[in-house]
């Protein structure tokens, strides 16, 4: 559901986990990079902003993390929410942990095609 995202130049990225079903997905990435949390967050946001259907709804930054909420409407008129979370990694094999989540808002009636 999220647009295809490219790795920042010079970063080493590996998938930590991925889960989901037809209404929600989550993928976590370990990112080993010299770039700062703010630089990685900006890198993600620039790529997501290129997609016309995704609109940034909100963002929060706190000490050691940055979170942004995104939304879009699918072809059937259903609303979806996405979230990007960038935070310092606890492990030694990565400097940052990036989490991407997408969820359909439940309880909405789909439009009739």
Image (cartoon, rainbow, N blue to C red):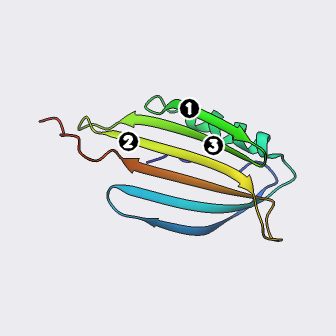
In the rendered image, residue 80, in percent from the top left (x then y), is placed at 38, 42
Q: Of label 1 and label 3, which has the lower sequence position?
A: 1
Q: Of label 3 and label 2, which has the lower sequence position?
A: 3
The disc placed on residue 80 is 2
Residue farthest left in this picture:
112
Residue drawn at point x = 46 percent, y = 67 percent: 19
* Eye-nearest disc, 2 or 1: 1
Task: Choose between 85 and 7: the one closer to the eye.
Answer: 85
SS for dot 3: strand
Q: Quadrant of residue 12?
A: bottom right
Residue farthest right in this picture:
34
Count neighbours of disc 3 (C-alpha within 10 A) and say few if under 14, some if 14 to 19, many if 20 or more: some
The disc placed on residue 18 is none
Residue drawn at point x = 78 percent, y = 45 percent: 63
In the rendered image, residue 70, in percent from the top left (x then y), is placed at 50, 37
Residue assigned mark 1: 58
Residue drawn at point x = 35 percent, y = 63 percent: 21
Q: Quadrant of residue 111?
A: top left
Q: CA distance from mark 3 to mark 2?
A: 17 Å
In the rendered image, residue 27, in percent from the top left (x then y), is placed at 54, 61
Answer with left or right where residue 59 lies relative to residue 38: left
Residue assigned mark 3: 67
SS for dot 2: strand
Task: Choose between 76 and 10: the one closer to the eye.
Answer: 76
Is 100 above or below relative to 109? Answer: below
């Amino acid at each position: 559901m999220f647009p295809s995202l490219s790795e920042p130049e010079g970063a080493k990225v590996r998938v930590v986990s991925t889960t989901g079903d037809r209404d929600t997905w989550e993928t976590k990435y370990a990112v080993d990079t010299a770039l700062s949390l703010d630089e990685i967050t900006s890198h993600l946001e620039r790529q997501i902003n290129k997609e016309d259907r995704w609109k940034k709804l909100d963002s929060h930054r706190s000490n050691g993390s940055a979170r942004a909420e995104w939304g879009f409407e699918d072809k059937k008129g259903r609303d979806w929410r996405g979230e990007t979370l960038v935070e310092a990694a606890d492990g030694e094999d990565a400097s940052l942990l990036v989490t991407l989540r997408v969820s359909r808002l439940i309880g909405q009636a789909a439009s009739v095609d």
